[in-house]
Amino acid sequence: PLPQIVAHDVQPEPRGWTSWLTTTDHKRIGIMYLVTTFVFFILGGVEALLMRLQLGLPDNNLVTPEVYNQLFTMHGTTMIFLVVMPIGAAFMNYLMPIQVGARDVAFPRLNAFGFWTFLFGGILLNSSWVLGHAPDGGWFNYAPNSGIIFSPTHGIDFWNMGLLITGIASLTGAINLITTVLNMRAPGMTLMKMPVFTWMG
């Protein structure tokens, strides 16, 4: 009799909530980006609400001027760097490989590293609320507001470190997406035939 050939099946994706911690699937990572940005969106909304409540009445003492400056800084930083920018990464991770006909991104583990780096940077930035003093130099962090004379606490240090770490996540994500688009497109899909959304990324 002829020897029986056994096909090697592709291993199924692990199930359960713990499987999300080790996943390298671009769709799951896109979903994790989306959920994480929504959590930061809620946090930034609470900070905005506290500012509006402070400004709602004259001579209000809901928060001190120092805390108001911290709320102003953290609200702007959260909405720009932890919501608006990474929500683009969420949709690009989920949709872009599908649009160009790739099975996954070029570097799946680097993709997962980028997400966890982004999450760690966001947590580090917000840990400043409980580890002493939140940044208070404005979300733009221009000098001299960010200098030691006007901001003598470690709040600006948290701001700098948090955004440097989330910047690493953005850089790894950009390298991954560019490599995927240039090297893993479906046969016949030239750059000029790609969807506009892929060009946006």
Image (tube, rainbow, N blue to C red):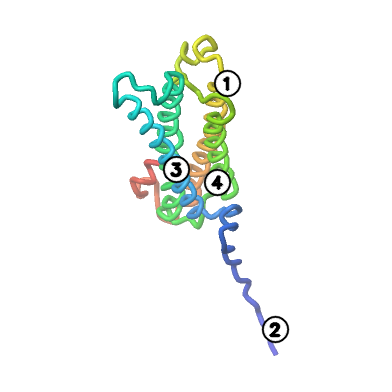
**Which of pointers 3 and 4 lies earlier in the amino acid sequence?**
3
Among the 4 quarters of the image, the one containing residue 101: bottom left
Query: Which amino acid type is shown beneath numbered disc 2?
Result: Pro
Q: Which residue is drawn at 38% across and 31% down?
A: 50
Query: Which residue carries the number 1 mark?
Result: 154
Query: Which residue carries the number 2 mark?
Result: 3
Q: Which of marks 4 and 2 is in front?
A: 4
Q: Is residue 113 depicted above or below 188 in this figure?
A: above
CA distance separating discs 3 and 1: 25 Å
- CB of mark 1 within 8 Å of CB of mark 4? no
Find the residue positioned furthest to the left.
57
Q: Point out which mark residue 111 bears.
A: 4
**Which of pointers 4 and 2 lies earlier in the amino acid sequence?**
2
Q: Nearer the viewer, residue 6 or 54?
A: 54
Query: Which residue carries the number 3 mark?
Result: 37
Q: Nearer the viewer, mark 1 or mark 2?
A: 1
Can residue 170 be seen? yes
Find the residue positioned furthest to the top.
149
Q: Which residue is drawn at 57% across and 50% down?
A: 108
Helix, strand or loop for disc 1? loop
